[in-house]
Amino acid sequence: MTAEVLVPAERLSARVAELGDDLTERFAGLDPVFLGVLHGSFPFLADLVRATRCDLEVDFLALTRFGEGGRVRLAHDSSVDITGRHVILVEDIIDTGLTLRSLLAQLDTRSPASITTVALLDKATRRLVTVPVDHAGFVIGDEFVLGYGMDWEGQFRNLPDLWAVVDLAGFMANPEALRSLARTQD
């Protein structure tokens, strides 16, 4: 077997509902802006905003890495003015923290009232820098994860479960095996 279900769709749904309840309580009456970091966060963001029962606005931004140090720059910026607004930054996964640190520094220059980070997955053991992860769906190890927005070469984002690839070489030699395995889980 090249992969196994790490978090089934039902557990994902329940956890996203809990996060939505937390955000509803915290931001009721504040009209927050949810900023989703493309592309991996979009299924999580869609479910999260539906689970958050307060007035809110949604926009997206996309990042790209460049240079030897893997510096981050905005490839697509949000069109929402966040000055004085409560921003909820939605990420699919926080790994080393380097990308999040850079993004938070860029957003902070726009004078938001606050920035709250929400990540579906937190790989805390891989953290190289300290960054705030205010709400995390799940803390995981060093698994290579696919599904529910996570991809490999643009594929597998649409799997409803989160899968951990346990045999990376086997997966890369035959990625179709995961599709077949996922179909049997439905």
Image: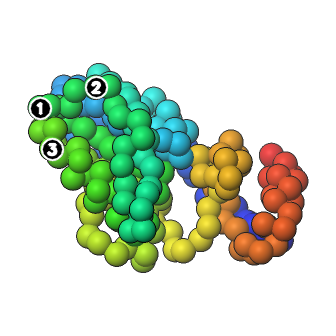
* x then y, percent, for residue 62: 43, 41
Q: Amino acid at mark 3?
A: Thr
Q: Amino acid at mark 1?
A: Gly
Crowdedness near tag 3: few (<14), some (14–19) or many (≥20) residues, C-alpha within 10 Å:
few
* x then y, percent, for residue 179: 82, 52
Query: Which tag is nearer the camera, tag 3 or tag 2?
Result: 3
CA distance for labels 1 and 3: 11 Å
Tag shown at residue 109 = 3
Is 109 situated above or below 65? above
Q: Amino acid at mark 2?
A: Val
Is 136 situated above or below 48? below
* x then y, percent, for residue 171: 79, 67
CA distance for labels 3 and 2: 14 Å
- Looking at the rendered structure, the secondary structure element under dot 3 is loop
Tag shown at residue 104 = none
Query: Of callouts 3 and 2, which one flags the residue occurring earlier in the amino acid sequence?
Result: 2
The answer to whether residue 54 shows anywhere in this view is no
Q: Pointer 1: what residue? A: 84
Identify the residue at horizontal 38%, vertical 29% (top origin). Answer: 59
Q: Judge from the rendering whether residue 101 lies leftward or rightward of residue 11; answer left or right.
A: left
State the image quarter where residue 143 is shown.
bottom right
Q: Pointer 2: what residue? A: 80
Depth check: give the residue in front, 85 or 98: 98
State the image quarter where residue 24 is shown.
top left
The answer to whether residue 1 shows anywhere in this view is yes
* x then y, percent, for residue 134: 28, 55
Q: Judge from the rendering whether residue 117 lies leftward or rightward of residue 95; answer left or right.
A: left
Depth check: give the residue in front, 139 or 169: 169
Identify the residue at horizontal 42%, vertical 46% (top origin). Answer: 63
- Looking at the rendered structure, the secondary structure element under dot 2 is loop
